[in-house]
Image: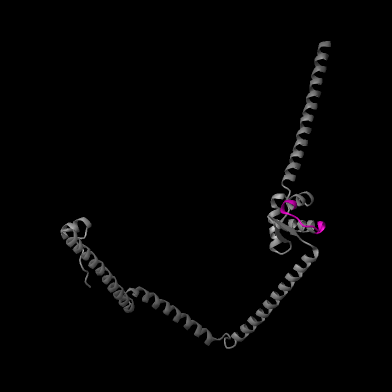
Amino acid sequence: IVSHTSKHCSAHKHFIIHRCVKSFIISYCVKSTLVLLTLYTMSRKKGLSLDEKRERMLDYFHEQSSVFTIQQLEKGCSKQKGIVSQSVKDVLKSLVDDDMVLYDKIGAKNFYWSFPSEVAIVKNRRKDKLQASVTGLKRKRDQLLETEESEKVGREASDERDAKLRRLSELQDSVAKLQAEVTQYAALDPELLEEKKLKTKVFVNAANRWTDNIFAVRDYCKNKFSIEPDRFDQNFGTSDVDYVEL
C-alpha cells in the first residue's frame, strides 16, 4: 500500500511539474510573439513625406533665425526635426528651387537662410502668378466657348447635313485610295526620273575625271620611270579602267 501511495504521489508531482513547464513555455511564446509584432510594427512605421520634411526644415530655419552651412543643417535638422541627415540635401534643394530658402556662396562654402518675411513675399508672389494664370485660362475658356457657339451656326442636325457628311466621308476615302495608288507609281514620276538622269550625268563626269587622272599618272610613270602601261595596270589593278558613257 505504501509503495502504491508513493508511486501515486510521484506521478502526481510529475504531472504538476509538466503542467507548470507547459504553461511557462506557452506564456514565453506569447510574450515573444507580442514583442516581435511590436518590433515589426515599429520597423514598418511610415517615414516622413517630402512635404513634411520641407515643413520641418522651414520651421528649423524660422526658429533659429540664423544662417547655416549644409553640414550644420544635416546635424541640426536630424537632431531637432527628425529628418534623416542623408535626405537633408534633397529637401534643401527643393526649398531652394521654390525660393523658400535663399543661399549665397562665400569662399568655398554655401550659406543658407530663410526668414518668415521672405517666405511670405515668395508665397504672395506665387499666389499673384497663379491668380494671373487662372484669369488667363478663364479668358481663354470663354473665347473657346464663344468660338464653339459660333461654329455651331449652320451646322444644326438635319437630313441634308447628314447626307453631305456621308458624301464628304466617301470623297475622303476615294482621295486616300488615289494617294495610295499614286505612291505605287512614285518611282516612275517624270520629275523624279529627270532628277535621277541629271545626278547620273554628274556621277559619270566625276568618274571620267578620275579616269583621266589615272591615265595621266600612268603616262607620267611611263615617261619618267619607263614603267610600261601593262605593268602599271598589273601593279595597281587598273587594267579594266576605262571611260564611262551614258
**Magenta-drawn stretch contains 6:** no
**x%, y% of residue 182?**
36, 76
> Can residue 73 be seen from the camera position used here?
yes
Quarter of image, res 15: top right
Left or right side of 54 for 184: left
**x%, y% of residue 218?**
20, 62
Quarter of image, res 56: bottom right
Residue farthest front in this picture: 224
Q: Is residue 245 above or below residue 80?
A: below
Asked whether 242 or 122 is in front, the reply is 242
Coloured how? one colour
Asked whether 41 or 96 is in front, the reply is 96
Asked whether 200 or 110 is in front, the reply is 110
Q: Is residue 151 above or below residue 198?
A: below
Q: How many marks?
A: 0
Left or right side of 191 for 229: left
Quadrant (top left, top right, bottom left, bottom right) of the N terminus: top right
**x%, y% of residue 54?**
74, 58
Who's the residue at 29% across and 75% down the image?
197
Start and end of the magenta stretch?
A: 62-72
> Can residue 1 be seen from the camera position used here?
no
Q: Is residue 9 above or below residue 110?
A: above
Left or right side of 228 for 158: right
Asked whether 151 or 116 is in front, the reply is 116
Left or right side of 78 for 179: left
Who's the residue at 83% across and 17% down the image?
9
**x%, y% of residue 112?**
74, 58
Quadrant (top left, top right, bottom left, bottom right) of the C terminus: bottom left
